[in-house]
Image: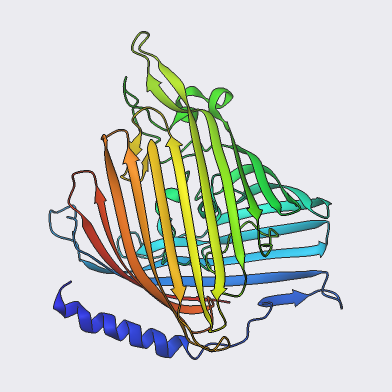
Amino acid sequence: MKNKYIPLLLFLFTASFLGFSQGATEYTGGMKVKLNEDGSKYFRIISWAQFWAQHTDNTTLNSTGNEEADLNFSIRRARILMYAQLTKKFLILTHFGLNSQNANNMGPVGKSDSSQLFFHDVWGEWQLTTDHSIGGGLHYWNGISRANNQSTLNMLTLDNNRQSWSTIGLSDQFARHMGVYLKGKFGNLQYRVSVNEAITNSLDINGTPTINTATYNGRAILGGAEASKNYAGYFDYNFLDQESNFLPYKVGSYLGSKRVFNIGAGFFYHPNGSTILDAQTNDFIGEDVSIFSLDAFYDAPLGDNGSSITAYLQYQNSNYGENFTLGQTYETGSMLYTHVGYLLPGETDRKVKIQPYTSFNYRSIDAINDNATRFGIGGNLYFTGHHSKLSVEYSNQKYGNLDAVGTFTVQGMIYL
């Protein structure tokens, strides 16, 4: 990192500490409005924002051939989520916001695509029994893994492992499918299953299938009759404390407030989701997309000194079609991912908490007959738990025989 940026990053760290440490100390139920005396009828509003300052070793060139800046600022997420229950039988949820807004995708009068708010989630849910519910709409009751159902409010790492969000922009809109779901639990076993529509305008909409290489645009090429539906599910057994499945968003770190040990398994299946060129007929034919995952999550206090551990391990096998690869992000192959965090000892009711962590991602990639790795090391400085925190992370990513890329990120976050 160039020396000229060190004072700036130190300033950001200090300013974030001073600003966030003045935040509210009690959040209890959040911004929750009771509509009757006992609170059984209510609506709740959650708002959060994440601001990034990011330095990257390898800079890119702009359209004129000049280097882009190696230090950049961005709004990683700015969101508002609202849900309401007028009876225990039904719930409605809406969630909107924007993501990854920066100087290169902003518009002069706020009308560019990246400046516009859009719905992340809009669904309604009906309770069938005490433990089982059915719903429909633009939803986040995903399959595959815990990481593919991750909440962005309480991650352990600065951001989610990108390859675990396995269908973003390929079959869904920003990790949300349009469809119907069933969720619930049988004792300690929780489940979520869904039947969904695949989007037509995927990230690979302009991909051209060849004889040996598939593209993920089956619905656009083959039509909805052959490639519109996909199926997903995730099942996890809660051995210790039971996690809530009221909402789909999985917690990243409980900071020692619970004792959780879960083993999970999930899948995603999209018949004819990808296409490839048939060598005999010279026609495009469908290839099924299938993703399977096994994972384990552990979060618990360590003794009575205020420390705790958070650990996650995931194995994922991804088949997007023969030799599929897109943007050094999605590939046919397999992945092993893990992260571990340690909350430092101290009084349990202390305001400021520190949690260093490390993460590692290893992927084997069929298309290049090689692998990719990503190593991350960082930490969270909590001022009021996940409600106000400062995170730093250095990551180093290597893809095949390309040069490794190092990135240093500082994130400030508040949510109410």
Q: Position of residue 80 (x, y in %)?
A: 57, 67
328 above or below 150?
above
Residue nearest the viewer, comparing 359 with 287: 359
Q: Residue furthest left?
A: 65
Q: Is residue 272 left or right of residue 67?
A: right
Q: Position of residue 128 (x, y in %)?
A: 83, 49
Q: Quadrant of the N terminus?
A: bottom left
Q: Residue furthest right?
A: 37
Question: Which residue: 67% across, 80% down?
Answer: 28
Question: Which residue: 36% across, 57% down?
Answer: 360
Residue 280 visible in the snapshot: yes
Question: Which residue: 46% across, 65% down?
Answer: 77
Residue 411 visible in the snapshot: no
Q: Is residue 274 left or right of residue 230?
A: left
Q: For residue 259, which quarter of the picture?
A: bottom right
Q: Is residue 214 left or right of residue 296?
A: left
Say how many tags the image has. Answer: 0
Question: Which residue: 82% across, 74% down?
Answer: 39
Residue nearest the viewer, comparing 56 with 66: 56
Residue nearest the viewer, comparing 149 with 243: 243
Q: Is residue 242 left or right of residue 304?
A: right
Q: Position of residue 42 (x, y in %)?
A: 78, 70
